[in-house]
Every structure is written in C-alpha cells, then in structure tokens.
Image: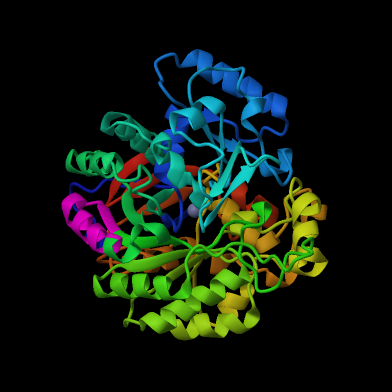
Amino acid sequence: MKEYVGKDTEEERYEKGMILPSFVDGHAHGNLGGSRMLLMCSLNGSTTLEENRERLKAFVEAHPEMDVIQGIGWNDATFGPNGPTAAMIDDLTDKPVMLIDFGHHSYWLNSAAMKRKNITKDTPDVADGVIVRDADGNPTGCFREGSKIYFEDLVYHFSVEQYKKAVLAYQDVFLAGGVTMLFDPMVNMDYGWENLMEACRQLDAEGKLKIHLHGGYQVFVDKNPVRDVEHAAELREKYKGKNFAVDHIKILLDGVLESRTGYMNEPYSDSDDGYRGMLRFDLDTLAATVKKANELGFTTHIHTIGDGAIRVALDAFEKAGTVPDNRPALTHLQIVDPADIDRMAKLGVVVVANPFWFLKDPTYHQKLSIPYLGEERAENQYPMKAFFDKGLVVTQGTDYPVTLDISPLNGMQTAVLRYLPGRPETLLNPKERVNLSQMIKVATWNGAYELKCEDRLGSITVGKEADMVVLDSDITACDSEKIAAANVLGTMIGGEWVYTAK
Ligand SMILES: [Zn+2]
C-alpha cells in the first residue's frame, strides 16, 4: 500500500487481528427490525402465554400515545397448530392489538382489532392464507399468511419521521457488526403508504444513510403482481439515491415449516390427507411476474422454504426465460431435492442461505421438525456444501429480526460447525459442512455479487471503495468454536470510519 500513502494519509497499526472486506447481509429485514426495536412490543423469546401477556401489558402501559398496539415475536411452538386466540388477550386493552409471529407469517389479533376491521364469521377465506376459526366458524384471532389483507393497515403503519429513527437505529446495529451492505426484502412493508421508502430517500439525501441499502419491492398474487412490478419501476426512479436502490422484486412463494405452510414435494409426515403446505403463487402468475421483472431490469428474490416451492420457482424461471447475468435469488432453501440443485446451477441462481439456522434448534427440532417432516427430512435440512459442489454462488442472510444477533461471524461459525458450541446434541446434517474460507467469501464478495456490486465492493482491491472491517483476532487461526467470539474494532465505508468500538 506504501505507494498510496500521501501527506494526508492517516496510518493505523494493528498488532494482531484481521482486516477483511466488510460484510454483506443478503437478506435482512432491517427496516422491520428497526421498527420493532423502537415502535413495537417485543415478544421474541417468550415461551408461555403468561409471558406474552406480561410483555404486552407493560407495552400498553408504556405507550398511551399509540392508537393501535403492534407487536412481534410470538412463537407457534407456544400455542400448537391452531395458534393463539383473541380471548387470551382481550382483557389487557380496549385498543386494537396486532401481533406478528417471530417468523412473520402469522398474526394474532384481539377482538377490538377484528371489530375495527369488521372481520366476522362472514369474512371469506383467502386462497393464499388461513383464517383460524372455531367450531361455529368465528375467527379466533389467529391469521396466517395472505389472510393479512383484511387488516393490512394495522401492520407497520408508521410516519416518515418514525421510520427515519428506525432506519438509523438498525443501521447502527449492522455497522457495529461490520455489515456495510444489506438487502431488505420488504421496503414496501407499509403496504402502499411509501413512508418507509421516503424515509430512506430523505436519510440518503441528508447523507445519514451510510450503509448500502438494496430494497426488494414485494408483490402479491391477489394484487395484480405484473402491474405492481411496473409500479415498482416508477418507485425505483422516485426514491433512488447514492446508497438506496429499490432494485429487486420480492416474492413470497410458500410459508414456513413450523406453521406447516412451507410447500413440500411430499406430504407433511403428520398429515392423513396428503397435505403438502401452501403455494402462494400459481406457476403461470409467477412466471409472468418474473418475466415482467426481467424486462424492467429487476432481480427477483424468492422466498422458498420447501422443496416444492423451490421446484415451482425454478419452473417459473425457465418459463419466464433467463436474462444474461440477471442473478435471480432463492432464499432459505430448508428442504431441497438434490436434482433441483443442477437446475439452479444451469439457471444461474444465487443461493441466499441462512447458516445462522444450521443446527437442531432446541425449541423446534423435537417438537415440530420431526413430527412434521419425519426423521429423514428433518435430518437433511439446510444443505450447503451441495451448492458449492455444483458451483453456485452462495450468500448469507440473517433474516433479521428472525435472527436478532446479526453478526455475520455467527453464520460463518455455524456453517462450519453445524452445532452450537458446547451443545453437541444440536448437531444437524454434518455432511453439509463447509470451510471457513468458503464462508468468508460467502459473507463478502458473494454478497456483493448477489447485489451486483462486486465491481466496486466485496474485496480489498485497488480501485474498489474501501469498505472494510477490522476484527480483534484472526478467525482463520482460532478454534472453529471461537470464530464468532471475534470482536469488530472498526467498520469503514468508502475509506471513512462509520463505527469504532469504544
Ligand atoms: Zn425474510
């Protein structure tokens, strides 16, 4: 580097540690996490009804200014297949209450919320969701997936000013973890209001948005998704700035396995009637949506949990026709048919994996994964090495705030170990282990490739933009169980410190 040192250059010397290209989070709901941190009741980690109630009660008391109480983080494992009910919380407040589950696929409403939105016995079912009902057909208060259309304006509706605070709050979290670029799959999470995109645009124009923020505009099967892709192209122009770009179309193709909505090639193991989960787009609509996105220069980013959803997504990519270097992304990929990995390679699919979850979750594995999937499928969850073996570009995403500790080092460590340090019983599918140098590339250059920025970011190279992270230890020289114990000393974007450890 010596030939680049001039009279204004500041030199810093580190006696130990490691300097890496800074990290990319390929799928993180930053805006959702920031909103939750500041504006919503946190139910994350609560494992009993009583604990959920106590947290909700405290939040209601602390926020007399709020007209609607929003919260997030309850867990299906606490309530069983029919989910929670309005009656469980009706005594806590007269205000409408809307609580999202921790995986963002189910919603728990109180009676005041259902009353405000006029949801009754006569409210019709939807094709891509579930309204849980009692024996008389009355909605109980638990809603899954697309049934959210009946109460959308109770979900994430905050002002531009509130959103600006939320963006700055999560930006700090990511910069402290060494992450300088992220893909947020739902920049229209406030459904049609555009307050969130406006907040990002304003912060970018004010020079306060430091992180490279790529946004996905989510489209829905029952809202004319092809036309919505055209609308997204207008919004892309309206809101773009130096660090903010709405350059992806996000599609939720299935649900999640823990609520039995992930779409499988083979039936759920506890099903007597061949139930395979939920597919939220039919193939023709999906292919038409992808085709329009391709034509308008968007990258598609599709949520696929089950092997059935992955297959339909690949069918749609084929049907829509590939565009050179378009890099369509599939994310989550919990259960994968090995035959489809060859097709993914042929189609140039980018795999946005969640190595943070590559272990037998103590809450889930015995209680949900094995009953729903059977022993064999439960053991074969989350392939990783198989993608590398076929030459696919793999990136990693936290799905924050599903994963709250966003340190990319956690994902790298878990992909290498596939168990929690000190908890050998959590070992999952060890034949899919990958090595640390593969994971360093996953978290840096590959992430830049996913977001089409590898020409200027993702590696420490003369001519690139000097986005870097300094760690206090050399992760390539430590015990694999200690990778995530390294601390970030500083994070740099474009040669400027944006975070330094105190
Ligand atoms: Zn997600």
Q: Is residue 292 left or right of residue 120?
A: left
Main SS, magenta residues: helix
Whole-percent x and y of residue 437?
55, 68
Q: Quadrant of residue 99?
A: top right
Depth check: give the residue in front, 480 or 270: 270
Q: Which quadrant is the C terminus positioned in?
A: top left
Q: Is residue 240 magenta?
A: yes
Is residue 288 visible in the rendered image? The answer is: yes
Q: Which quadrant is the N terminus positioned in?
A: bottom left
Q: Is residue 145 left or right of residue 225?
A: right
Depth check: give the residue in front, 148 or 269: 148
Colouring = rainbow
Residue placed at 38% from the left, 69% from the top?
A: 449
Q: Is residue 121 left or right of residue 297?
A: right
Depth check: give the residue in front, 237 or 166: 237
Is residue 479 visible in the rendered image? The answer is: no
- Up/down of 342 relative to 328, above or below: below
- Up/down of 413 relative to 289, above or below: above
Whole-percent x and y of residue 200?
27, 43
Q: Quadrant of residue 85?
A: top right
Residue placed at 29% from the left, 67% from the top?
A: 298
Whole-percent x and y of residue 17?
51, 50
The image shows a total of numbered marks equal to: 0
Q: Which residues are magenta?
A: 228-246
Whole-percent x and y of residue 311?
55, 76
Depth check: give the residue in front, 412 or 352: 352
Residue placed at 25% from the left, 51% from the top?
A: 243
Q: Is residue 286 magenta?
A: no
- Up/down of 120 relative to 380, above or below: above
Residue placed at 43% from the left, 83% from the top?
A: 318
